[in-house]
């Protein structure tokens, strides 16, 4: 017998699924970045890493899944990550249109494919 939990809505389940999928996608992207950068990875501070995770999560939420699956994070160099971090700061400050910033982030990754 299936019991309904009145305190958990379909919307709650959908949001939780969304967040889990986003976290898993970002974790895989970060693993690819770490692997691709090898010895350069330790140059990033903990706050840089947290910021990268945030901006990649925003990118994942914005772009189509098929486009995300085609991104090659392991091909990025340290200067690419620095550019992405700058875009992340723009996004947090709302200094430019969010769509433009996220398109710029995606373009940095696409250019390395």
Image (cartoon, grey):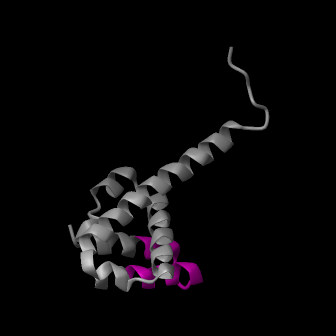
Which quadrant of the rendered structure holds the C terminus? bottom left
Which quadrant of the rendered structure holds the N terminus? top right
Q: Is residue 91 left or right of residue 6?
A: left
The percent coordinates of residue 67 (x first, y second) are 33, 56
Main SS of the magenta segment? helix
The residue sitting at 52% across, 77% down in the picture is 97
The residue sitting at 26% across, 79% down in the picture is 39
Q: Find residue 80 and report its image quarter.
A: bottom left
Residue 101: in magenta span: yes
Residue ranking furthest to the right: 6
- 2 versus 85 height, above or below: above
Q: Is residue 53 left or right of residue 73?
A: right
Q: Find residue 63 and report its image quarter.
A: bottom left
- 41 versus 8 height, above or below: below
- 77 versus 10 height, above or below: below
The residue sitting at 53% across, 50% down in the picture is 20
Is residue 96 visible from the viewing direction of this image?
no
Residue 93: in magenta span: yes
The percent coordinates of residue 27 (x first, y second) are 42, 60
Residue ranking furthest to the left: 113
Is residue 49 visible from the viewing direction of this image?
yes
Q: Nearer the viewer, residue 39 or 83?
A: 39
The residue sitting at 23% across, 70% down in the picture is 75
The percent coordinates of residue 105 (x first, y second) are 38, 74
The magenta segment: 83-102
Question: Total marks drawn?
Answer: 0
Q: Nearer the viewer, residue 96 or 113?
A: 113
């Amino acid at each position: 017998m299936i019991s309904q939990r009145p305190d958990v809505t379909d919307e709650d389940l959908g949001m939780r699924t969304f967040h889990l999928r986003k976290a898993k996608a970002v974790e895989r992207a970060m693993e690819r970045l770490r692997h691709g950068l090898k010895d350069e990875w330790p140059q990033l501070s903990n706050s840089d890493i947290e910021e990268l995770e945030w901006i990649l999560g925003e990118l994942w939420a914005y772009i189509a899944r098929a486009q995300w699956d085609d991104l090659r994070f392991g091909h990025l160099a340290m200067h690419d990550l620095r550019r992405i971090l700058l875009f992340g700061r723009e996004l947090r400050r709302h200094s430019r249109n969010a769509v433009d910033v996220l398109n710029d982030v995606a373009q940095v990754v696409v250019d390395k494919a």
